[in-house]
Amino acid sequence: MDFLHPGEAIVDLKIMRDFQPQWIQNVGKVPYWVAWGYHIQGAIYQYLESNHLPFLIVAASKEKETDIEVRQISQDNLDSALKYVKRLAPHYNDVKHGTGTPWRCEQCNYCRKKKT
């Protein structure tokens, strides 16, 4: 969380390559803020702050001509993301404590390194 404006908003600053939709395998093109999980990040910030303040992404692109954007993530998206986090949290906690097995994506560096 970059800024908390009590009673007003939670603000997170981002520097992006661009604001174009991103391709997610088995899903298709999604907005950049979904592809990078910024809605999940915002939902966690709201949960930690025990509020439903608006979550704003203030972003700038790295393009030759810098683009800037202020995007508010809808409360519906944030609520959905928090449900997702709460559903998966027990599994991640089990993995953290060595009592669960991580899910393998077979695409990331960790999966390639641990391939048997």
Image: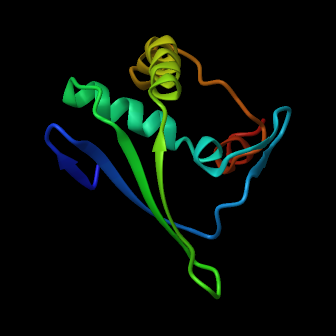
Q: Is residue 103 left or right of residue 76?
A: right
Identify the residue shown where x is 30% and y is 30%: 46
Image quadrant containing the C terminus: top right
Up-down relation of residue 30 to residue 86 (above or below): below
Up-down relation of residue 86 to residue 12 (above or below): above
Q: Is residue 98 left or right of residue 35?
A: left
Q: Is residue 35 left or right of residue 21?
A: left
Residue ranking furthest to the left: 6
Residue 2, percent across and down? 27, 55
Residue 89, percent across and down? 44, 17
Identify the residue shown where x is 39% and y is 20%: 97
Total tally of numbered discs in the picture: 0
Residue 107, percent across and down? 77, 44
Residue 104, percent across and down? 70, 30
Choose between 88 and 8: the one closer to the eye.
8
Q: Is residue 99 left or right of residue 32?
A: left
Type of colouring = rainbow
Choose between 47 and 75: the one closer to the eye.
75
Choose between 15 and 108: the one closer to the eye.
15
Identify the residue shown where x is 76% and y is 39%: 115
Up-down relation of residue 9 to residue 48 (above or below): below
Residue 16's image quarter?
Answer: bottom right
Identify the residue shown where x is 63% and y is 70%: 17
